[in-house]
Image (cartoon, coloured by chain):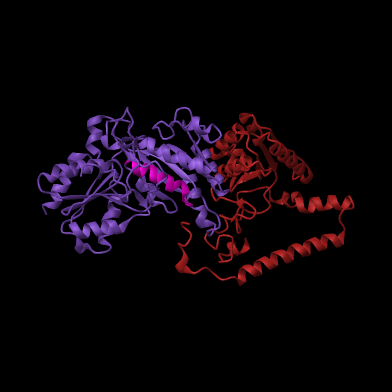
Chain colours: A purple, B red
């Protein structure tokens, strides 16, 4: 139970080992080969290959007319992608850090996400916004946020958050093919980058073909009967480590990787909590008004009687992410906080 | 469009969009309720047209108040950088709701701002219909020839309040307005040239009235949307 890179079904992998970033790039490459209307725009996506390697090698493969470096002008180029999607292209547009959403939120939320609805369904906006999220490497309060709760709160865009190479490839293919705007959020800590904290779970077998991962389907990455941990992204890796530690003490932990926040697979959450009666939500995003509250409400809206103990939430305690390492580690949902929350929950 | 303004199921957006958010894919028309933020999507439409090798171009229209927004400047830079087939039109009516342009804008003409993006720009004064047509024709020809965007500022005046019922208490130039209305002014020009007479003017006015009355009648006769379907078009 130490690997999470299990495919969705039992199809044997034809087997090449890739980091999450290379798996993402491979998915983009396959779709660009298949569909000439797919282009990739963003800051430093060309010769640099994306500052978190989300486009490494694509410029050489497709040239500057399809892998397009933009000015530092997010309102301009994200709006441009929206207009191109309205005209039937399938642009992928990179927002270098999710934190930068606020300089272009009007284009993301008032335009990209609303046009389909405002047009009464007559206009579609088939585009993908890729963006890097997450902290843990002293990048401070403006370059470390997850903010998926903010994106997921605003209707009209799907939100997917892969935690591993298999899902990174399968979800980017699904996102590109989707006729809705999809926000694809990759944590820097799961990409397998040589200059980040080493993460053995960021490299895994990935099928060579264009296998997709369905948007809106969570993955039970570890089965257990005593407590359910619902989480997403890098926190999946941490939760799995903690689950292994707790197994020695007889605590049998089930870990759910949500993979998609919009649409949210509430059925998988309810099935698991119905079985374990204990729920811990781990979220690297802010505590209040966010994902952890939504997961708790998913259960209590249906039947609070399922819970044999109060829901525990391990999240950023509503604090801008500090720069200094001990301060940053104190607010991130790291293994120590996850372990304490699970022990507390199962003891009640 | 009228049906949409009346919030009817037969409207362009089936009553979801309303008067500020109109989309007609048959004509590639769209609009935004956020000042200047309609410019960036217009770039994308131009980008798609350019890649398909068609002679289609995008035309993006705002008022002069929008020319102080970031989205305006980002769009001019990107369009010039990538030589996109766009014509930017700024309708300068001297007023941003209640604030005169002298209190909002650092330059006497937004055409000066074209230089900041190495973009040809013109300002056309005085509701001069034929001068506007000529300038627009040059801009469209440039865009179609692959020479990139043009910025046009058309100076006009606001004939009515910012909204229906705006008492315009902040405005002192109201008595000058009727004399500058371009429709009667240009009608007089065409009459002098012998291109219009009483009969043709009456015919044009009658046709226009009929068209508007028919549209309003269609809107009023159309059904309102089903409240249970409010969320039907959030996703495809």
What residue is rendered at 27% in x and 34% in y?
A199
Where residue A46 appears, x then y in whole percent? 48, 30
What residue is rendered at 47% in x and 66% in y?
B229
Give the camera-side residue of A72 and B68: A72
Horizontal relation, residue B157 to residue A140: left or right: right
Give the camera-side residue of B201 and B3: B3
**Viewport quadrant of the N terminus of chain B:** bottom right
Horizontal relation, residue B15 to residue A271: left or right: right
Whether residue B23 is in magenta: the answer is no
* Above or below, comparing residue B99 to residue B146 in the picture: below
Residue A105 appears in the picture as rendered: no
Task: Provide the residue span drawn in magenta.
Answer: A164-180
Secondary structure mostly seen in magenta is helix
Where residue A291 appears, x then y in whole percent? 31, 50
Horizontal relation, residue A295 to residue B84: left or right: left
Residue A288 appears in the picture as rendered: yes
């Amino acid at each position: 139970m130490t690997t999470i890179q299990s495919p969705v079904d039992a199809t044997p992998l034809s087997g090449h080992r890739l980091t999450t970033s290379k798996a993402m790039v491979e998915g983009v490459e396959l779709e660009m080969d298949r569909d000439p209307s797919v282009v990739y725009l963003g800051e430093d996506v060309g010769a640099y290959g994306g500052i978190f390697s989300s486009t490494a090698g694509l410029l050489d493969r497709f040239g500057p007319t399809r892998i397009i470096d933009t000015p530092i002008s997010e309102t301009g180029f994200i709006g441009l992608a929206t207009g191109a999607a309205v005209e039937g292209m399938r642009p992928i547009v990179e927002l270098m850090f999710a934190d930068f959403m606020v300089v272009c939120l009007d284009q993301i939320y008032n335009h990209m996400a609303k046009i389909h609805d405002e047009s009464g369904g007559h206009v579609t906006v088939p585009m993908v916004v890729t963006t890097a999220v997450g902290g843990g490497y002293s990048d401070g309060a403006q370059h470390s946020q997850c903010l998926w709760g903010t994106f997921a709160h605003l209707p009209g865009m799907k939100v997917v958050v892969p935690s591993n190479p298999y899902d990174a490839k399968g979800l980017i293919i699904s996102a590109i093919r989707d006729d809705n705007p999809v926000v694809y959020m990759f944590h820097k800590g799961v990409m397998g980058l040589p200059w980040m904290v080493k993460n053995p779970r960021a490299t895994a077998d990935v099928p060579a073909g264009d296998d997709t991962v369905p948007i809106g389907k969570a993955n039970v990455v570890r089965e257990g009967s005593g407590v359910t941990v619902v989480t997403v992204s890098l926190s999946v890796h941490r939760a799995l480590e903690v689950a292994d530690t707790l197994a020695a003490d007889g605590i049998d932990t089930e870990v759910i990787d949500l993979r998609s926040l919009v649409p949210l697979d509430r059925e998988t959450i309810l099935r698991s909590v119905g079985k374990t009666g204990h729920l811990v939500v781990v979220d690297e995003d802010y505590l209040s008004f966010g994902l952890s509250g939504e997961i708790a409400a998913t259960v209590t809206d249906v039947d609070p009687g399922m819970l044999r103990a109060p829901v525990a939430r391990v999240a950023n305690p509503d604090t801008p992410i500090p720069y200094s390492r001990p301060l940053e580690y104190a607010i991130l949902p790291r293994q120590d906080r996850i372990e304490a929350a699970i022990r507390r929950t199962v003891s009640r | 469009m009228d049906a949409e303004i009346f919030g009817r199921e037969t409207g362009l957006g089936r009553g979801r969009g309303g008067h500020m958010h109109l989309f007609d894919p048959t004509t590639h028309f769209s609009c935004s309720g956020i000042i200047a933020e309609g410019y960036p999507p217009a770039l994308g439409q131009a980008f798609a047209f350019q890649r398909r090798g068609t002679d289609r171009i995008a035309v993006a229209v705002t008022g002069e108040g929008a020319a102080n927004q970031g989205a305006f400047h980002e769009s001019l830079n990107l369009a010039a950088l990538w030589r996109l087939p766009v014509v930017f039109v700024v309708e300068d009516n001297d007023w941003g709701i209640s604030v005169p342009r002298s209190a909002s804008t650092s330059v006497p003409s937004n055409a000066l701002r074209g230089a900041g993006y190495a973009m040809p720009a013109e300002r056309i004064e005085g509701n001069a219909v034929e001068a506007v047509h000529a300038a627009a024709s040059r801009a469209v020809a440039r865009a179609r020839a692959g020479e990139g965007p043009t910025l046009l500022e058309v100076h006009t005046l606001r004939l009515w309040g910012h909204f229906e019922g705006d008492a315009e208490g902040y405005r002192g130039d109201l008595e000058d307005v009727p004399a500058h209305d371009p429709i009667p002014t240009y009608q007089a020009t065409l009459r002098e040239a012998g291109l219009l007479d009483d009969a043709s003017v009456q015919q044009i006015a009658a046709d226009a009235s009929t068209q508007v009355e028919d549209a309003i009648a269609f809107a009023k006769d159309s059904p309102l949307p089903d409240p249970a379907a409010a969320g039907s078009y959030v996703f495809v």
